[in-house]
Amino acid sequence: MRNLTVNQALLSRLFVLMILLCLVIGFDNALLADSTTKNSGKKKGYVTIATIGSGPASVASGSEPQKVVERMIAHWKRQFAQVLPDRPDLIVVPEACDRPGGFSAEKMREYYKIRKDQMQQFFSRTASENNCYIVYSAYRVMPDGSNRNSSVLIDRKGNVAGIYNKNHPTISEIENGTLCGKEAPVFDCDFGRVAMAICFDLNFDELRLKYAGAMPDLIIFSSMYHGGLMQDYWAYSCRCHFVGAITGSATPSEIRNPLGQVITSTTNYFNFAVARVNLDCELVHLDYNWERLRKLKAKYGPKVTISDPGCLGSVLISSEHETISVEEMIKEFEIELLDDYFARSLAYRHKPGNMEK
């Protein structure tokens, strides 16, 4: 009888503890749900981006095609290992990242025939295993035998989220069977909207103006050429962040903000760079906005950043707030966006009586 009484008392205590535990878990879940509801208002925020400036693996010209593929996979596995500890949301690699150097045209065709989609499958596995997006930039052989110089956007599950075909291959590329892409797609990712460009593309306004009109949050540039001031100009004119992955350590691979300023860069010592980038931002001109910007900063303090590059007249507003977006901040203080101000200026120029006859 005593043992039964003790067991009943013990069971009663356990029952009370279980009830308390359920209450605590329920309360925590309610808080989490409430937090998720509040944060769902912000569509954009911080994203961790990694750029890798490595070229393809070095291989002997007489290597068997399958051995070349295996060497390329091993090479990029080592390159990815440098940035994966930072848990990036997006990894970008250079143009033609798996094209061996020193191969004859015939040897290259043989390599691509054997490679097929082995490299893309490896990139897809890496993306899926590490819950990140990866851009696989490479030559693709189409069913009709023609080539495309492409950037393939792979999502966090390892699926193809989109493909961009280089719109402006060089003359020599075209002569060697690469056809020009004709689309300028913008792809939706869970962190924002992205567009892509490859190498020689950066010289042509036709493509840049399409992207300026599409208003992506980020332009991904895989290349063998840096582009110099053109990277700054594309970032500023398209009002978006810009990440470049350039082949070789001699040329930096960089991430830029919409002002064209470099956020992070590879160095002569490290061929990779990683940065947390805030995509919840907008460009505005200082004209007519001085007092509004002062009021914005006075209210939100460290929850808003106003970056001035100097000499330009434009500044970048970034929301650091957990639930209030930069769009909401701008609307609250009636701040005029950069493009709206330029449009208003042009309209005022053409107003009757404001132009010389």
Image (cartoon, helix red, strand yellow):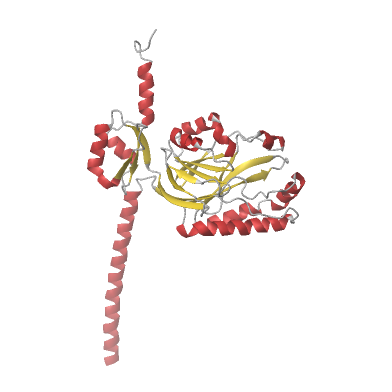
Is the C terminus in the top left, top right, bottom left or bottom right quadrant? Answer: top left
Q: Nearer the viewer, residue 273 or 298?
A: 273
Query: Could you say where residue 302 lies in the image, as x and y percent from the top left?
Result: 27, 47
Is there any visible trace of residue 155 in the rendered image?
A: no
Task: Name the residue at 28% across, 74% down.
Answer: 17
Query: Could you say where residue 220 lies in the image, as x and y percent from the top left?
Result: 51, 43
Is there any visible trace of residue 228 in the rendered image?
A: yes
Task: Name the residue at 30% across, 28% down.
Answer: 287
Query: Could you say where residue 174 lies in the image, as x and y percent from the top left?
Result: 68, 35
**Quick check: 319 above or below 129?**
above
Task: Name the residue at 27% across, 87% down.
Answer: 6
**Quick check: 57 above or below 140?**
below
Q: Nearer the viewer, residue 259 or 131?
A: 259
Number of residue marks: 0
| Res. 7 image quadrant | bottom left
| Res. 166 image quadrant | top right
Task: Name the residue at 50% across, 35% down.
Answer: 230
Task: Classify residue 249 as left or right of residue 3.
Answer: right
Q: Nearer the viewer, residue 2 or 147?
A: 147
Residue closest to the far bottom: 1
Q: Nearer the viewer, residue 214 or 279?
A: 279
**Quick check: 58 above or below 313?**
below
Query: Could you say where residue 51 lies in the image, as x and y percent from the top left?
Result: 51, 49
Task: Classify residue 14 as left or right of residue 112.
Answer: left
Is the N terminus in the top left, top right, bottom left or bottom right quadrant? Answer: bottom left
Residue closest to the far top: 357
